[in-house]
Image: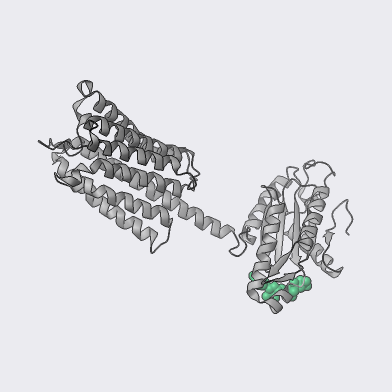
Amino acid sequence: MGTHQANASPAFHLPPMIELDSSTLLLVNALFGVLAVGVWLVLAFPFRIARRACLLLAMAQTVMLPTLVAGPGPFRELSGICLLVALGLLSLSLRQLLRLRQQRLDLLGLLALGLLADLARLSGLPAPISMALTALCMAALALLAGRDLLLGSLGLDGWLRGGLVAPYAAMTTYLMLRAIALMEPEQAPQWLLQDPRQHAGLAAAWLVLAMAISGGLVALVLSRLIQRIEALTRHDPLTGLFNRRELREQLARQQARAQRGHVHALLMLDLDHFKRINDELGHAAGDAALCHVARLLRAAVREQDCPARYGGEEFALLLPDTTLAGAMVLAERLREALATSVWSWHGRHWSLTASFGLALSSAAPPSRGRVPPASASELLVGEALVDAADRAMYMAKSKGRNQVCLAPLPGSAPC
Ligand SMILES: Nc1nc2c(ncn2[C@@H]2O[C@H](COP(=O)(O)OP(=O)(O)OP(=O)(O)O)[C@@H](O)[C@H]2O)c(=O)[nH]1
């Protein structure tokens, strides 16, 4: 953090009568750093969790190590640069973890500015000014890291998010105060001009900060892992669409809404003569055709819809707040989009079609998504809705395929 030499190292007192000097605290910090490097490497390699972010964190922690243990000499001279680079790597890895990896220019710009400010000492810029400018760049990096944590999609509630941001806020405040102190040394308290080698309190604070930041990062990596596992349990691995389990959950949610008067529709579709693709082109081609259908489905639906792979070559589309007219339009549009789309496998074009079965939770008025609250007997929901759509889909198969059939509903006639 600076190049001041450690003359006397005042002790930091912890009750009951534990006395720690700054070198011991820095050594503990370095040992903690070595442990953290090991943790990041284990997460990155054997476990392959957030690999790039973990690698950046391992590098950040490694870059920090010389600043913690270096005696007087060239390494200590470089401690400002090491800290700056470590902070830059930490901010980059946070962006990676928060999936903001496309924005890097601001961080790289601050890193470059900080390096220039530190190196400017060599060409005659007074050391306190150079150190103050470097500290300001570090403060900006810490501030951006805190902001990213505040705004990023973490899946964490307010208090946890606040706990993650707190160390970055503390670091930003300290670095800014230090920059001001370096520029106005006469009016600044002495501890702001010292570095952790000279002040046991600072060394202790640095250790606490390092532990809080590492703990927060581990929590972040774990929350990403949990999100990934959750996504795996809800999605079909081949197509990336929702799976049957998630469809059931969404159907149950819609069942509760249907009882309050909301209408939803379920569209089931089954590819026609799909077996031929597998037989003539191979199983990999069959998989690619399923992915093609999944892309069409995804492109056709609204955000609130639930496109799912029901199993094999059968797909389902749950459409909340959808009337009969709207669902019919969508089903026809999808049928046509699939029949006219070009799917090819190794230069061989193949015409894909599907048979569609449509069922509605209730016979809604044509232009509104809501009907008066209905009793359970007037509704077609959950597994009964799936069965009805499935039967309508088989009806479409028996009528010659590549068409949409509507399941019978009170007030509407079957096709
Ligand atoms: N490639 C691939 N094939 C699958 C997958 N799941 C199911 N299948 C195949 O899908 C085919 C379904 O065949 P059938 O049930 O006879 O249906 P179809 O050939 O589409 O005929 P119709 O539905 O009557 O039009 C079978 O050959 C299954 O092996 C999958 O994930 N990948």
Q: As drawn, which residue projects farthest toward the top? A: 187
- Nearer to us in this view, 367 or 192: 192
**Residue 317 makes an appearance in the image:** yes
Image quadrant for the N terminus? Answer: top left
Q: As drawn, which residue projects farthest toward the front? A: 123
Q: Name the residue located 85 percent from the left edge and 57 percent from the top edge.
A: 408
**Residue 382 makes an appearance in the image:** no
Q: As drawn, which residue projects farthest toward the bottom? A: 279
Image quadrant for the C terminus? Answer: bottom right
Q: Is residue 121 above or below residue 267?
A: above
- Nearer to us in this view, 317 or 251: 317
What colour scheme does the image use? one colour
Q: Name the residue located 28 percent from the left edge and 26 percent from the top edge.
A: 180
x and y percent of residue 204 in the render?
22, 39
Q: As drawn, which residue projects farthest toward the left? A: 8
Q: Is residue 207 left or right of residue 271?
A: left
Q: Is residue 173 above or below residue 58?
A: above
x and y percent of residue 278 in the render?
69, 76
Q: In which quadrant of this rendering is ligand 1 seen?
A: bottom right
x and y percent of residue 156 in the render?
47, 44
- Nearer to us in this view, 378 or 187: 187
Q: Is residue 377 above or below residue 22?
A: below
- Which of the 4 quarters of the picture holds residue 112? top left
Q: Is residue 180 left or right of residue 76?
A: right
Q: Is residue 282 above or below residue 151?
A: below
x and y percent of residue 33 in the render?
27, 50
Q: Is residue 289 left or right of residue 11?
A: right
- Which of the 4 quarters of the picture holds residue 160? top left
